[in-house]
Image (cartoon, rainbow, N blue to C red):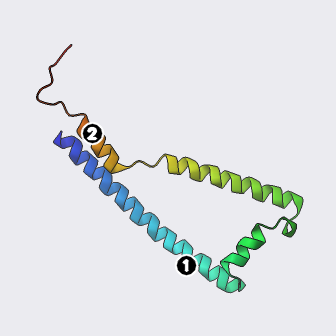
Amino acid sequence: MFAQEKNLEEKIQKNERKINELSIKMDAVDREVHALLNELNVTPDQLTQFVHTEKNFSEEDWAKLQEEQQKMHTKLQVELQSIRNPKEMQKRYAERVVQNHWLFVR
């Protein structure tokens, strides 16, 4: 039982490290995006409006853009569904413990 708890704690710490690494990467990407927007002298809203307007692109480019957007949306949904909640897992492991009043039956 203690080994399971220790293993679970290690997994939680590992996930927290990954989350910290991802937040650092996200900050770096945010800085790069901000620098690009400053270089182009546009606001995020202007860029979003440009990307969502079909007449700014040829038919082929618009189709590719929509396809890539759908792929990214699908990938994001799959990744969000695969995220495990460590506290929920810990609760499930705690529920699996054999209680003192249980009888062993084969």
Vertical side of 72 occupied by 33: above or below: below
Q: Give the quarter of the image for residue 103.
A: top left
> Which of 62 and 54 lies nearest the eye of the viewer?
54
Q: Is 84 placed left or right of 99 in the picture?
A: right
Q: Is residue 1 left or right of residue 44?
A: left
Q: Is residue 41 above or below residue 13?
A: below
Q: Residue sitting at 34 percent across and 49 percent down?
A: 86
For the point 15% across and 31% down, which residue is it? 99
Q: Which quadrant would the N terminus be assigned to in this image?
A: top left
Closest to the camera, between mark 1 and mark 2, is: 2
Q: Position of residue 79 (x, y in %)?
A: 53, 50
Q: Amino acid at mark 2?
A: Tyr
| Residue picked out by circle 2 | 93
Disc 2 residue crowd, few under 14, some 14–19, many 20+, Cα 10 Å: some
Location of residue 5 with respect to 23 vertically, above or below: above
At 17% from the left edge and 43% from the top edge, which residue is drawn? 2
Name the residue at 61% across, 76% down: 33
Identify the image quadrant of the C terminus: top left
What's the mark number on residue 31? 1
Q: Which mark is residue 8?
A: none
Q: Is residue 43 shown left or right of residue 96?
A: right
Q: Is residue 102 above or below residue 97?
A: above
Q: Could you tell me residue 92's position as x and y percent?
A: 30, 40
Q: Secondary structure at mark 2?
A: helix
Q: How many marks?
A: 2
**Alpha-carbon distance for marks 1 and 2?**
41 Å
